[in-house]
Structures are given as structure tokens and as C-alpha cells.
Amino acid sequence: MSIPANATARRRASFHTLTVTEVRRLTEDAIEVTFTVPAKLAGHYDYLPGQYVALRLKMRDEAGVLRELRRSYSLCAVPVQFPDGSSELKVAIKRDIGGQFSTWANAELAAGEVIEVMSPQGAFVSRHAGAAVNGGVNILNSMNHPEELARHAGNYVAIAAGSGITPVMALAKSLLASNNETRLDLVYANKAAMDVMFLEDLADLKDRYPGRFALHHVLSREQRISPLLSGRLDAVKLETLLDTAIHADGVDEWFLCGPFDLVQLCRDVLAARGVPRDAIRFELFTTGSPDRPAGQHGRPVLIDSSEETWKLTFTLDGLRAELRSPVHARESLLNAALRVRPDVPFACAGGVCGTCRAKLVSGDVTMDENYALEPDELEAGYILTCQSHPTTPEVTVDYDG
């Protein structure tokens, strides 16, 4: 496998079948799932703290029809490799109201289950980790030894809500272990104490790093001793926390993870305080209105020979494909590609994860949403195909680019 030249480089997503070896209950509505990665596949699952994987399996819907489901979950532990060359992945799955996969997982998933797992993706990683890799650390080793990735003695702040704590757990463990002078403040918002995921793990971090890890639980539906930590986390409360309880000066990186409203609130507050955009790392778990393709085949589109169409061309794994897309259908490039190549990479289909990224070779498109691509990627011509719609008669994209 070709290893990326830097920590945030994206690689092609590929699925392999992995076995669940442990399911640990975190809360009444959340579990931690451990997958074993055999030695022969270990290279496909090297990752950096903060990245995610997608799980893929087929389940029957309410009508009894077997359909494919893909769900993305952040990796919640630091990478580890065992003497025999095998490794493991840990993800946390919180039950969503009406969520078919998360409901099934919390009720029935057990050790021994076999699920297709995508190779790790995502750019929600420390830029200092990337600098360390670029500075000469062997990324093959570094991905399994996160302590080598962030030698910088930094000051970090993370703000998470609900299951947004998942990637932050991996980042916190990695950063705090990397340097004896690194400090991390974590603001963790939940409805009530019973909803706090990784409660014992967070307590262990406080015990291990009492002078360098500060944890601030904010509970919206439960009264705490401090009014500052009670009620919904809004702009006023966040400003007060930053002014009084958090070491907010000289912060090297800010990590934000949770629902769209919270992440946007934090970004706005930090921007108003003059925090540089490139110092803020964020990840969304949902945008509130994802438009998912149907299964892995894309929604059906009928083409009338007499109607106007776009000509779409894409390259994937060195193979070129061409197809026509009706102008009136306004289907995304991803949906169109899935109609002829079911192996086109995607995960969330909501503009959040970036798995469907491709390079625009020719033509023009419009992107509905973008929560995944960095400014330099946009300047280089990359687009999210799940959110992109053609605006010129011919469009060519390259998934291998």
C-alpha cells in the first residue's frame, strides 16, 4: 500500500471483512466495539488519532427488503500493534433515535460478528502530528506509536458534545502521552451524567495527568454545583468558560466535534476572539439533512433519449467510465457514478467525511455543502462528489487523483 507523505493525506477507501472481538457497554445507549485486524491486513488499517472508519453490512428494512447500510464512526483509541503483527480498531456507537444500524448494534451486536470495515479516513488530526511526520518520523511506525507524532509541547483545547467525544478520546490520549509539558482542556457537553460516554476513561486521564488535563462537564438537563457548568452550552457560557476556566491563551490547536449547531457556535465564538482559522480543527457527526444515495447503487434515474443530459466521465482504479445524467434529475456526481460502479468510495454522503473526494479534471460543478475539504484542497481542484452537481455539458473527475 502507498503510505501518504503526510499525516493528513487521504488514501483510497477500501473495505475488508473484520471480526468483532469485544463489545463494551459505555452508557445505556452507547457501546464500544473492538475489531481485530489480522497481520496480513494491518497495513490497510494504520491510522492517526482522530480518524474514522465506515462500517458496511446488509440489513432488512421494515418491508423486509435486504439493503446495504454504511455508517461512519470515529476511532476512539490510540493505534496499537501486537507482537504477532495484528492490530485492533475501537469505535463507539451511540443509539440514534430511529437509527436502524445503531439500534441494532446496541441491542444485538456481539463478539464474533463479522462486518466490512473501511480503511481509516479523515483529516481531524493534530497538525503538529503531521509536522512531526514531515520532519522525518517514519509514518509506518508512527501510526502505531502516536507518542512519536506530537513531540511538540503544546496547549490544546477540545470541545465535544455527546458522541463527539469519540475521536477526542484518541486525540487526548495521544497528545497527553506525547510530551510531559503538553496541556489539554476538554469541555464535554451532555444532557445528564448518565449520558457521559467514556466516563471511567476520562477519570483515568485526570488521575494520570492531574496537572495537565482539565475536564469540564457541562450538563444541559442536570443541575451542577457551578451554574457555569449547568444548562445548554451557548455563546455566553462558552465565552465565560474561555475567560475563567480554560487556559485559552496561546492555544496551539482547538478541536471541535459534535452536531453542526454546536460546532458552528464554537467556530463563531473563536473567530470573534481572533483565533486563526487554521488553528481550529473540527468534525461534524451530522449536518442535519444528509442526502444519502440508496444503498451502494445510487438512486434510480430514468433517461429519455430526447431530453438534455450532462456527459459525466470519471476515473477510478485506473478505469475510465462515461455516462449520461439527465439535467432535470439534478443528481450528484456520486449518485451518477454509483449507477455504473458500485465500488465508488463514499461513507456519509452528507458532505461531512470527505471519503468521496475526487479531483475535478475538466468542466465545472457546484457544491451544495462542504464540511470536509480544506482550503488548499479546494484550490487544488478537489471536490466532494456527493455534494457536486454539473454546471457544464461535460464534467470529468478523477477519484485516483
Image (cartoon, grey):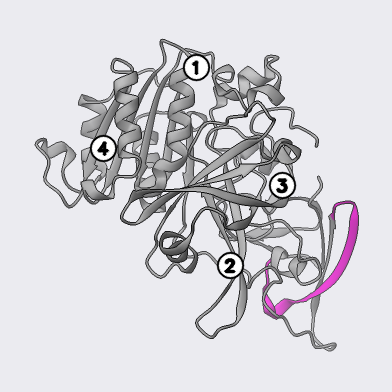
**Between marks 1 and 4, how big is the CA–CA gap?**
28 Å
**Between marks 2 and 1, how big is the CA–CA gap?**
39 Å
Image spot of residue 226 (x, y percent): 11, 35
- 108 and 26: which is toward the camera: 108
SS class, disc 4: helix
Neighbours of disc 3 within 10 Å: few (<14), some (14-19), many (20+): many
Q: Nearer the viewer, mark 1 or mark 4?
A: 1
Q: Is residue 321 magenta?
A: yes
The disc, 3 or 4, on the residue closer to the chain's N-terminal end is 4
Quarter of the picture containing the N terminus is top right
Mark 2: amino acid: Arg
Residue 27 visible in this rendered orientation of the protein: yes
Mark 4: amino acid: Leu
Instruction: Check disc 3 and report the residue beneath it.
Output: 382
Q: Which label is found at residue 292?
A: 2
Q: Which label is found at residue 178?
A: 1
- Residue 242 picture quarter: top left
- Give left or right: position of 65 versus 235: right
The disc, 2 or 4, on the residue closer to the chain's N-terminal end is 4
Instruction: Check disc 4 and report the residue beneath it.
Output: 238
Q: Residue at x 28, y 50 (%)?
A: 195
Neighbours of disc 4 within 10 Å: few (<14), some (14-19), many (20+): many
The disc, 3 or 1, on the residue closer to the chain's N-terminal end is 1
